[in-house]
Amino acid sequence: MDPEVLKQAPLFRGLEDDAVAALSAAMGTVKLARGEVLFHEGDSEDRLYVVVSGKIKLGRSGSAGRENLLAVLGPGQMFGELSVFDPGPRSTTATAVTPSELRVLEHDELNGWLTGNPEVAQGLLGQLAGRLRRANDVVADLVFSDVPGRVAKALLDLASRFGDRRDDGVHVHHDLTQEELAQLVGASRETVNKALADFAARGWIRLEPRSVTLLDVERVERRAR
């Protein structure tokens, strides 16, 4: 495992190297196969996780059975922090999009670190503030932005975390199915596919299986506004 990946997580920001090593040593390891569920919405599980490799999706199911994808997380990102400050059932279902490795910290162990290391608490509060800001952005997008705009914004977000800049553009191997992309945008698969096809026809992107290449990032950014 690359220790630099782990240090990207908000939990470790501001800690000295010896504290990083000690906190890392207190964490367990979980490995998931593609499609394997880590926990379900409503579970009483209360541990905190950091993604070391692979991708994890967090989703919710509606009363009619429709699923909404809230986030796709990659190396250096963490989840499960809500249970630290508000113990209760899990609010999402966590599923491995690809084979993944996670580091896990038990609730009681984390509480001990919060007491003796204010930097850890600051990192968690920063994570929660970021989560609230993203939730506000999602609500605003659903109200004020059309589906193509939301698709463009989702592509840019995925590119910022999983993109690989090449001569012909930014290659984004997101590993998501068409249905999962639609769930991430909060629209039907048909509507999202229509937006993607339009972007491709305009020469802004090139569609590939479970990936996309942004050929004209500036145009995609304009459409996302």
Image (cartoon, rainbow, N blue to C red):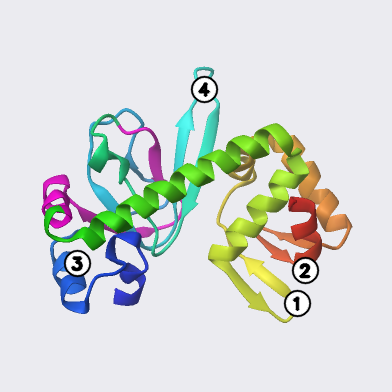
Q: Are marks 1 and 2 in contact (CB under 8 Å)?
A: yes
Q: Which residue is mark 2?
A: 215
The furthest residue to the top:
63
Q: Are marks 3 and 4 in contact (CB under 8 Å)?
A: no
Q: Earlier in the sequence, mark 2 or mark 3?
A: 3
Residue 143 at x, y = what percent? 69, 32
- Residue 2 visible: no
Q: Which residue is mark 3?
A: 24
Classify mark 2: helix, strand or loop. loop
The disc label shown at residue 65, or none: 4
Instruction: Describe residue 121's horizontal placement relative to residue 179 as left or right.
Output: left
Q: Earlier in the sequence, mark 3 or mark 4?
A: 3
Q: Which residue is mark 1?
A: 168
Q: Residue at x 77, y 68 (%)?
A: 215
- Structural crowding at the residue carrying mark 4, measured as other residues with C-alpha within 10 Å and reported as few (<14), some (14–19) or many (≥20): few
Q: Between residues 130 and 63, which one lies in front from this camera angle?
A: 130
Classify mark 3: helix, strand or loop. helix
Q: Which amino acid, by three-letter code, is at mark 4?
A: Gly
- Structural crowding at the residue carrying mark 1, measured as other residues with C-alpha within 10 Å and reported as few (<14), some (14–19) or many (≥20): few
Distance in Å between CA atoms under marks 2 and 4: 36 Å
- Structural crowding at the residue carrying mark 3, measured as other residues with C-alpha within 10 Å and reported as few (<14), some (14–19) or many (≥20): some
Distance in Å between CA atoms under marks 2 and 3: 39 Å
